[in-house]
Amino acid sequence: MLIELAEHKKHMKEHKKEKKQLQAELAVLQQTIRENRLPVIILFEGWSFSGKGTFISELMINFDFRHLTMHNITPPTPQELRRPFLWRHWNMLPKKGEMSILDCSWYQDISTYPLLDLTDEDKNKERTQDILQFERTLHNAGYIIIKFFLQIDRKTLKKRMDSLESSSATKWRVTEREKNQYRRYRRCHQVYQNMLEETSTPIAPWHVVDASYLDEASTFIFETVIDTIHNAANQQTHGTWPIVPPEETFPLLTTEPIQNIPLDRKMDDGDYEKQLQKLQKKLFSLQAALYREKIPALFLFEGWDAAGKGGCINRICQSLDPRGYQVRQIAAPTEEERQYHYLWRFWRSIPKTGHITIFDRTWYGRVLVEYIEKFCTKAEQVRAYGEINELEKQLTDWGAVIVKFWLQIDKNEQLKRFNDRQSTPAKRWKITDEDWRNREKWDSYETAVNQMLANTSTAFAPWHTVPTQCKKYGRIQVLEHIIHAIEQKLR
């Protein structure tokens, strides 16, 4: 890629247009983005002093800043290092109909940072795979990703360094990092070359720009942005937007249909209190071990309305130091949350190392309520199985413990609990019209749940189907599964 710059320069010269005309087209382009609700990410990578700031400024000045965000990606902070490396990038996604322009990006983690010894180079292969999955997941949801790499040769790099160092106003910009990049130009060149070759895909190709020629380079950047967005808008309007299936699939565990789960398990009060006290004490000590070992944990709860999720979560929280966990109760997405990828709001709640997040409802709502209520299509439901498996694999590769529960009761028990909530003033807030509507779709939900379990129970994140017809029995089962998973991880 980088060695083809001479041909690239020729291409730019042949197709060069008047800059003013392109700027006028860019101004109109933002209206296309707004009308078609296209989320657009334009990222710039390249050598130091290759002109990223200049090109970004020239591009941004043509847009309405109310619908545009610029991010300058610097090395991760100590707090960011305690999250999965893609965590901060998920948090920077643009809304539908808006743009993000990135000065550097997630590619720093597999190029520049290893060269600076800021990340372990051995992780490059794993992170490269995560990036490819990330871009494919965004693309399949309609995100437009435009990637520019700004190339200059070693002579130009030295010339620009010397020019900056010659002025007292700019010499501060030439740090040991830039000097080291110049000294190790050949090594850096090879790292960048490998990155471009491994991560240029049909849905998110790299556009290599000869940044030695500023006017021609900016013209090429303008043309590429305009053409890419127009083509994307046309594809999405006409239903020809390409959906890319995952390259990797994960072996799935055999699951039992939920209607076959025995619900007659019971536990008397005396035995329950004795076991509860013992397990809660054990979980408290394990939380301390997770904190010491900097191991994050996620406990995910799905189940029928009134199946006892809140009671199980309450017994877990009784065992924990409140400074080390958070509970996220997931309802229907808000108006703001609907402007992003459906996983965006969950990434925001991924715990830092040594901490715990408990989800009362989860990203599995995508394949349950969102599908049944027709907020997503059948194709999107099927695609979500793979996207969720990839998410959970990334989290477990990062080091997280994931424990997933489906809480099972029968339809008669649900009706009994609904009526109890309806007739008890202290519990009435727990029952809503939506609960009754969902109950009418019991058979549809049952089918969707069985499909979910069959398609997302993996060795790294298996489902635990827990009968909670007897609430006390179910709570003990939940605590035992959590303790076992943490102990296995600590071993």
Image (cartoon, rainbow, N blue to C red):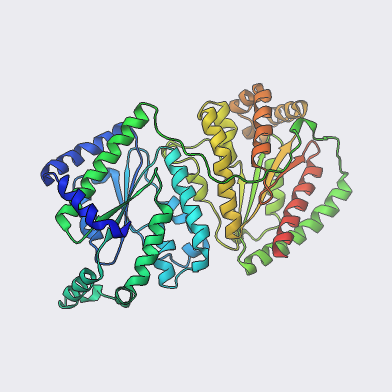
Q: Is residue 270 left or right of residue 43?
A: right
Q: Position of residue 138 (x, y in %)?
A: 44, 43
User: Of residues 146 and 483, which is closer to you in this image?
Assistant: 146
Q: Position of residue 256 (x, y in %)?
A: 76, 36
Residue at the image position 52 percent from the left and 46 percent from the top: 346
Residue at the image position 20 percent from the left and 41 percent from the top: 26
User: Of residues 137 and 261, which is closer to you in this image?
Assistant: 137
**Extreme top residue here?**
440
Q: Position of residue 367 (x, y in %)?
A: 58, 34
Q: Position of residue 86 (x, y in %)?
A: 47, 55
Q: Is residue 398 left or right of residue 314?
A: left
In the rendered image of this protein, does residue 215 appear above or below residue 490? above
Residue at the image position 17 percent from the left and 59 percent from the top: 213
Quarter of the image that includes the C terminus:
bottom right
Q: In the figure, residue 249 lies in which quadrant?
A: top right
Query: Do we see residue 64 in this rendering?
Result: no
User: Of residues 128 and 191, which is closer to you in this image?
Assistant: 191
Query: Do we see residue 269 in this rendering?
Result: yes
Q: In the figure, residue 449 lies in which quadrant?
A: top right
Residue at the image position 34 percent from the left and 71 percent from the top: 186
